[in-house]
Image (cartoon, rainbow, N blue to C red):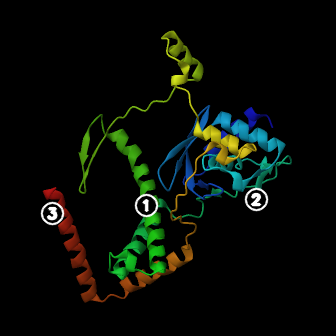
């Protein structure tokens, strides 16, 4: 397929994704959503960090041209290239097996294995509610802030649940942002029960095309080399589609971290049902005690806010 046609197809596929759908990167398994598309880029946001990345049309062309020649080994994908690979597989023209991404001339590749559909997912509000309830129950059961003393299983559950709550609340926060922007004027503040927000404007700049920038520099006698340099995203694409070795162009150091690679939804539902049964089993005395405890928490919050 012509690169222009493929680019158009990719943009349409991204724009047609259902609300809440996400993709994951092939190697690091980082979730990301499509924020918007433009004539020259697709803008994505990573769910685990909130980081935005622009996926440029010209870089897609490089990847697509290589795929026309031969398959790309998934294990060779650099972090900056991984989202390109995930988005490419939204079209039927490219197939994925356990080790490679390749051109599929018969266009029967099917749904991308890197697409996380939202069709069967709980609503964002329900997911946050449930995950927060599970996290609260876990924290109550741990009864300590000395995490170094906890068993590995408990630490694992704590890490997974805090990660899920963070991702869910970030999604809800972004959903609340748009209507708030419509209701607040420039620099206008709004005081809620739990805090204050302000509409703030920040200027975000991106360079004009190279020809325009170089012409402006030449007019003022500014050397072009003052503003030229290595584009890491483009370099990562070259690494993915050529025989260039990483150590020839990068100095590397190892960064060790914890990555959530799976969530046991069945266990979540089982635990939630157990919490529901416990609440249902409360007699009038215990129920009243719980209501008093919640009232005390609410009172302390009100006092903290009034004194803040």
The x and y percentages for residue 239 are 69, 44
Callout 3 touching callout 1 (CB < 8 Å): no
Between 127 and 304, the one lying in front of the other is 304
Q: Mark 1 or mark 2: which is in front?
A: 2
Disc 3 versus disc 1: distance between alpha carbons?
Answer: 26 Å
Identified at 53% across, 64% down, the residue is 259
Q: What's the residue at 47%, 79% (across, down)?
A: 152
Q: Please rate how many residues cluster around mark 2, counting C-alpha atoms within 10 Å: few if below 14, some from 14 to 19, many from 20.
A: few
Q: Is residue 12 visible?
A: no
Residue 139 location (% of width, % of height): 36, 76
Is there CB contact under 8 Å for labels 1 and 2? Answer: no
Q: Residues within 10 Å of mark 3 (few under 14, many from 20)?
A: few
Against 203, residue 195 (above or below) is: below
Looking at the rendered image, the quarter that the N terminus falls into is: top right
Q: Which residue is mark 2?
A: 99
Above or below residue 151? Residue 242 is above
Q: Taking 301 as reference, is 261 left or right?
A: right
Question: Which residue has dot 3 on it?
Answer: 303
Where residue 140 sits: x, y (%)? 34, 79
Name, please, the residue furthest toward the left.
307
Q: Taking 184 as reference, is 78 above or below it?
A: below
Numbered disc 1: secondary structure: helix
Residue at image x 86%, y 48%? 106
Q: Residue at x 54, y 43 (%)?
A: 53
Q: Position of residue 119 (x, y in %)?
A: 60, 60
Q: What whole-number distance in Å separates the C-alpha atoms at marks 1 and 2?
A: 32 Å
Q: Is residue 4 shown left or right of residue 47?
A: right
Question: Which residue position holds label 1?
Answer: 166
Residue lying at the far right of the rendered structure: 106
């Amino acid at each position: 397929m012509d690169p222009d046609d493929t680019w158009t197809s990719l943009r349409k596929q991204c724009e047609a994704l259902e609300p809440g759908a996400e993709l994951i990167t092939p190697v690091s398994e980082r979730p990301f959503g499509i924020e918007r598309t433009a004539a020259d880029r697709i803008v994505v946001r990573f769910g685990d960090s909130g980081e935005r990345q622009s996926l440029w049309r010209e870089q897609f062309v490089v990847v697509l041209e290589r795929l026309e020649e031969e398959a790309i080994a998934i294990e060779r994908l650099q972090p900056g290239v991984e989202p390109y690979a995930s988005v490419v597989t939204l079209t039927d023209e490219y197939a994925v097996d356990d080790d490679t991404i390749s051109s599929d001339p018969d266009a029967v590749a099917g749904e991308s294995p890197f697409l996380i559909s939202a069709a069967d997912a709980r609503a964002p509000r329900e997911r946050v509610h449930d995950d927060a309830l599970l996290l609260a129950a876990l924290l109550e059961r741990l009864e300590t802030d000395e995490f170094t003393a906890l068993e590995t299983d408990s630490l694992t559950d704590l890490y997974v649940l805090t990660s899920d709550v963070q991702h869910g609340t970030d999604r809800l926060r972004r959903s609340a942002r748009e209507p708030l922007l419509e209701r607040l004027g420039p620099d206008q503040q709004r005081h809620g029960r739990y805090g204050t927000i302000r509409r703030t404007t920040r200027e975000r700049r991106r360079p004009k095309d190279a020809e325009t920038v170089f012409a402006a520099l030449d007019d003022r006698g500014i050397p072009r080399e003052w503003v030229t340099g290595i584009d890491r995203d483009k370099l990562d694409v070259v690494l993915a589609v050529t025989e260039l070795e990483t150590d020839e162009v990068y100095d590397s150091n190892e960064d060790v971290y914890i990555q959530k690679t799976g969530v046991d939804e069945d266990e979540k539902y089982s635990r939630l049902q157990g919490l529901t049964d416990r609440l249902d089993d409360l007699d009038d005395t215990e129920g009243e005690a719980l209501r008093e405890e919640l009232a005390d928490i609410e009172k302390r919050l009100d006092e903290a806010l009034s004194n803040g």
